[in-house]
Image (cartoon, coloured by chain):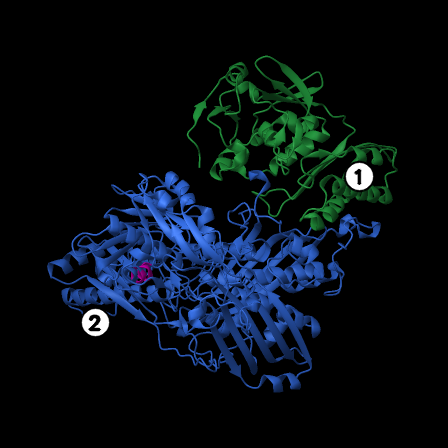
Amino acid sequence: MKKQQLHNNFNVVGKPAIRQDGYSKVTGKAKYADDYRFDGELYGVMIRTKASHALIKKIDYSELNENRFIKAIITADDIPGSKKVGPIKQDQPIFCADKIVTPGDVVAMLVGEDVKELRKLTELVKIDLEELPVLDDPQKALENDSILIHPDFKTNLITHYPLRKGNVEKGFKQCDEIIEQTYTTQLIEHAYIEPECVTAIPGEGNLKVKIIGSIQNPFTTRKVVASVLGYGLNEVEIIQAELGGSFGGKDDTMNILSARAAIAALKLNRPVKIKYEREESIIESYKRHPYILKYKVGFNKDGKLKAMKIDLLADGGAYSSMSSFVTWRSVVQATGPYEIKNVHTDVRVVYTNNPYTGAMRGFGSPQPIFAIESLMDEIAVKVSKTPFEIRKLNGFKQGSLTASGQKLTGHEVTLHKVLKKAVEVSSFDSKWNDYKKASGKKEGAKQSYINDSLILNKNDFINPDQFWRKGIGLALSYRGCSLGAEGIDAAASYVSIQPDGTVYLLSGLAENGQGMKTTFSIIAAEIFGISPDKIVYLEQNTSRIPDSGPTVASRATLMGGGATKNACEELKKRLIKLLVTIWKLKSGKDLVFVNNEIILRSKKSKRIEFGELIKQAYQQGINLATVGWYAGPKVHWEEETGHGSAYFTYVYGCQVAEVTVNIGTGEVYVNNIWAVHDAGKVINILGAEGQVYGGLTQGAGYALWEKISTHNGKIRENNFDQFLIPTSKDIDAIHPYFIEGKEKYGAWGGKSLGEPTLELTAAAIANAICIATGQRFYNLPINIEEMLLRRKLYPESLTRGSTS
Amino acid sequence: MIPVLEIFQPKSVDEICRLLKSNNGDTRIIAGGTDIIPGFHIDSPRFAGIKRLLDLQLVDELKTVSINHQIISIGAAITFSDIITNPVLNSYLPLLVKSSKTIGSTQIRNRATLGGNFINNAPCADSVAPLLVYDAEIKIKSFTSEKIMKLQDFLVKPYATRLNPDEIVTKIMVPVPSTDFVGDFYKLGRRRAVSISRISLAMLMMNEDKIIKEMRIASGAVTPIGTRLYDVEEFAKGKVCNEEAFKEIAIKLGERILAVSGLRWSSEYKIPVVQQVCYQLIKGIERRSL
């Protein structure tokens, strides 16, 4: 594969840099949450019920009385502070006291020294339940007679976001063609390789408790733990262990586990660890929202979009979690990156008894992108245009108005650049034409050979030359960077130069495996003109650095990068001021920090080593430590109309997938994916490519394999033998390309990449499958049964042959 | 949970037989462990009550491949990685090698063994269908006896075989197949690696003057256990090699598998697809026979 070279005037930025934590991770030296051991530590084991929805009448622990393995049974009664938590609505109990609303619910925790024994003992707890009807269909959640999951709220509606632009009914009347279509996307698990693990350690002095764990957002965890314990924020310290994957998944669940461990640790005055097995992790942790997406689109004969009516329904499951934020991104981006005068969007998210859903990489975008990018290809067919032409005609340009009425200015709108590049590097148009011709079928015409009888007719057999079909498809998106009008958006970074010229660095954001430590070190190294290996990135600890919000929304590089740059530039200013004095210069504008020294550009012989300058600065008593701060500009949103400048800047991406489909078996082989992204300035090309490889592989899993299904509210796929994620063998060639659009925010305009890489892939693969087979698929994942039968098949029972 | 175990590492088959002599079921042989260890972790009742494991790692005589008087003898504890690189197996038993390549991942193939695959007797055991079309027999030893049995007869039902607690399977014996056979193996999984078979088919065909002289077919995953489909083979025998006949054979196979397996949750997908796959396999083999 040809590697892209980025040409720029930087010394370190944009060059390939090996991640700082890479060596320790691949050699097994890195310390993950379960690698920490503490003297006298105890373990917590959860007690769950067998119900999906029930009132708790009585819990009888009498058989555990005087049991030598049990140090404590922790329940809701042990909670000194908030008994329920949640980022927006406080609807999720730490321990359930009166009601079960989903099978993952926990009523109590047994604490002791022997996990094996504790697990056996959970069977002895007698829970008297009054079962309630199970609501597992989000489409029934808003019916008048529907049972309420949380009766206090008087409705199962978590949030409704309307967006109104122009007059959609008038728009439909004025256009030539209308398509109406319904799409569905599935519930999926993050599938981080490291299941949840956390230890709470009783504090010393005024510090009440210290928590170390597999935590994505240490400051959120601190907030939850402090509120549950009734402590001040400064009495709780959260340390992040090396994180074995998160993808948005180590937030709510980890906050609650941290709180449970902390309650027990303080009650028993001993460290308490909670460590989940995979099955437990899948049963209790939140997932990605399944959506039902109804689209009605009106357009002219030439393909110009006129009006779009969108009705999205998301299943929030039993708790609200991040639902209101996730679905807000959907309402902003539901039309895709296209200019449409008349838009009428409603996004609703509802409670059910299903596993609860929250943040997952993509965060409300993969679902509408699958729908809108499928729809754009359908429109193209109607007006006899190529997928490229239809997007070129309607795509956002500089100054376009989004659905919420935001004018796209202040950054370079590179939508057409990424589209053009993707089409060029993949030879899209010629392949699209060839494969379409070869598949030989009109769109939507050919059905699968499978009919009601299981035994084939002779004319059902496919000629071996026709067995394999090739297809190519593309998908295009724009994505708001960072939190947008969801919340306060600011981050801190601490930089401290040591007397020998080495540097400490720490930001308030967290390393979740995305390579952030390396990214920030590159930024600091670039500014100081030193090598990134002179920088030690410190341990993530909430007591050491200002709260910088959560590490979510692909915001770390943008916000933390900005903060790191600010901090380093502040220190550099102090150094320049000193050097101007020493060298008796008029100004510092000719001073260049490069290759570990500072050079006077006008007089090359005038130079000083970085370390030497630092030594002199220390001798002069100059402060070489500072906290940099970076705050995003103001954005706003009107809840009633869905108007506003949702995000302060956007990124653009286009992916092309080339597949081979076996039309006899429904197998899909992903041969090539070309990913063209404008993430702004690329800080570490190796890290950026890594994001592309990982993100689109995850996106391919969403397209073809991954699905969590439930049976009477219980999860079937509770381990990786049934929840299938792609292996490295499942995607053949991945071709990343970067377009560096002009941007004033962040570090030299470095924006977002993590989520954009994931959100497009399923849509591109679905469009490729359509070209290969002549059939359009509306329901993810497009697994082998969906391909041939247009539905999923499930075993009747949850038990597996191998265990009975 | 892995129970508290005594683990023995015998160095010979004789020693194993001695250790198994009065086994009442609490002693189990462990070869690669790729079924037993995950089974312990999910508290599978199939592995409940085990107190002693006999590890085959050090028994070299169970890992060899030899060829003698037109019989290929394969040690039962040979790993799939070793099968894949073995020159004898590559020249004589290509379907076995092909199926071995589809099993699990590199790490699993490095540990999992041929004997373990059919002794565990999961419906989806990938190496079983090829062994069946090759007419494999197995040698079973105990402290007091030694017997030889056809593999098909050894396999009883899912996760059950005729192996007694005091016995060990030492060898798989396969007659060198006639060079007139052309064959193929197909595995349908949901993904490219670490994939449990949804359907597997192994097929050998011998044609003479455009007439099917002999056909051997065995299925996996789509039947309750790996199964030789003798009815279909009989049906195919003597048919003229043409589209019509191939389709009839595939249909017959579908009917036979449906009769053997009954209607299951997966039948709607598997039964039509296995016929399609069967037809594709025959066509592919025919092309290579020309």
Callout 1 crowding tier (Cα within 10 Å): few <14, some 14–19, many ≥20: some
The answer to whether marks 1 and 2 sit on the same chain is: no
Residue at left offset 80%, top offset 34%: B231
Q: State which chain disc 2 sits on.
A: A
Residue that badge 1 annotates: B286
Colour assignment, chain B:
green
In this rendered view, identify the residue nearer to me: A205 or A84: A84
Q: Is residue A704 left or right of residue B278?
A: left
Q: Does residue B115 lie above or below A578 as drawn?
A: above
- The image shows residue A643 at horizontal and vertical percentages of 46, 81
In this rendered view, identify the residue nearer to me: B239 or A3: B239
- The image shows residue A377 at horizontal and vertical percentages of 64, 69
The reply to whether residue A346 is visible in this rendering is yes
Q: Secondary structure at mark 1?
A: helix
Residue that badge 2 annotates: A587
Q: Amino acid at mark 2?
A: Ser
In this rendered view, identify the residue nearer to me: A7 or B28: B28
Q: Quadrant of the C terminus of chain B?
A: top right
Residue at left offset 45%, top offset 65%: A679
Colour assignment, chain A:
blue
Q: State which chain disc 1 sits on.
A: B
Residue A525 found in image quarter: bottom left
Q: Quadrant of the N terminus of chain B?
A: top left
Q: Is residue B82 left or right of residue A198?
A: right
Q: Which residues are magenta?
A: A218-224
Mark 2 and mark 1 in contact (Cβ < 8 Å)? no
Residue reaching furthest to the left: A620
Look at the magenta stretch and give its main secondary structure: helix
Q: Amino acid at mark 1?
A: Glu
Inter-mark Cα distance, 1 to 2: 84 Å
Numbered-mark total = 2
